[in-house]
Image (tube, coloured by chain):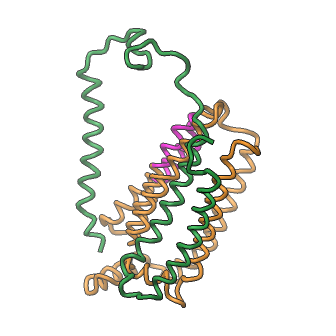
Chain colours: A green, B orange
Amino acid sequence: MLDVYAPVAPLFILAILVGGIILILSRLMGPSKPHARKVATYESGMRPIGPAVRRLPVQFHRVGMLFILFDIEVIFFIPWALVFRDLGFYGLAVMGVFFYVLLIGLAYEWFAGGLEWEQ
Amino acid sequence: MELTWELVAFLGFAVMTLGSGLMVVTSSNLFHSVLFLMTSLFGVAGLFVLLVAPFLAAIQVLVYIGAIAVLMLFVIMLTRQVMSRPELYNQQMAGALVAAAILFLALLFVLTPLADEIGGDVAQVNAEVIAEADDAPDVDYITVEELGRAFVTRNGFVLPFEVTSILLTAAMIGAIVVAREDEA
């Protein structure tokens, strides 16, 4: 029953091999003359200013969080969408209730300014 | 035990899951920990495929690796001091070991009778299942369509399905409230 996944195995092996070979070859064949400016963090050829590790604005967290939630919502839609023609009006009503509750959340988000980048 | 391709794949994914899980807790850089967590979650997705749950495996990759692990990376980068952890071990290690041992014994206690119930000789059962599967390829295979029907049928999961929307809405509101700048 799992034989259908057999072609994935060569893909896995090939991906690991290609990645490993590229890393090893570039280490073996590439010239290595380290220099203070060469090993410095690349910043478009400029002299790097300040630390590379900086705090991200909190907006990224909010966008990421909302992305996960909508991601999960879409995943609930996929199995339903595959059969919704057979389910008829009942299926539409069930998904309607599901969707309506989520619309409340979206409306709150919108009016609370959650979709704006600047607060 | 006979060495089948399924067994090889299972061992590969199990090593992947547990090995990267170990690296998650022992790596001194939190950022690396999350990258190892992604590998571990991918191993779990592989185990889902072996359990004939391809939809769950796809979602595992999509949601856990694609969204939740990336959000974890965001959260690590949001905070200034958390990027590296100087001390990996603290005084709670002994307690954690005891708790882990108790959990392991409890799982062993629960799962051993289940394994006995399925049949003491697992290889024998496997052979029977494989023999059956050759006649009827779709024995325990749950398709995504069946999942969709189960979501909406009255004696299926219609109530949990609707309650999920309330949970998601609550999480949505929570995400907005937590990330607000004013009333902190």
Residue A83 spot, x, y in % from top left: 37, 81
Residue A63 spot, x, y in % from top left: 54, 48
Which residue appears at 56% of the width and 52% of the height?
A65
Of all residues shown, which one is farthest toward the front? A111
Q: Quadrant of residue A60?
A: top right
Q: Which residues are magenta?
A: B17-38
Residue B115 falls left or right of residue B174: left
Q: Which quarter of the rendered picture does the C terminus of chain B lie within? A: top right
Which residue appears at 68% of the width and 46% of the height?
B180
Which residue appears at 53% of the width and 37% of the height?
B31
User: In the figure, B6 relative to B182: above or below?
Assistant: below
Residue A97 spot, x, y in % from top left: 55, 78
Q: Main secondary structure of the magenta part?
A: helix
Residue A54 spot, x, y in % from top left: 57, 28
Q: Is residue B32 magenta?
A: yes
Which residue appears at 59% of the width and 44% of the height?
B25
**Residue B141 in view in this figure:** no
* Front-most of residues B3 and B131: B131
* Front-most of residues B183 and B95: B183
Numbered-mark total: 0
Q: Is residue A102 magenta?
A: no
**Residue A38 in view in this figure:** yes
User: In the figure, A63 relative to B172: above or below?
Assistant: above
Q: Which quarter of the rendered picture does the N terminus of chain B lie within? A: bottom left
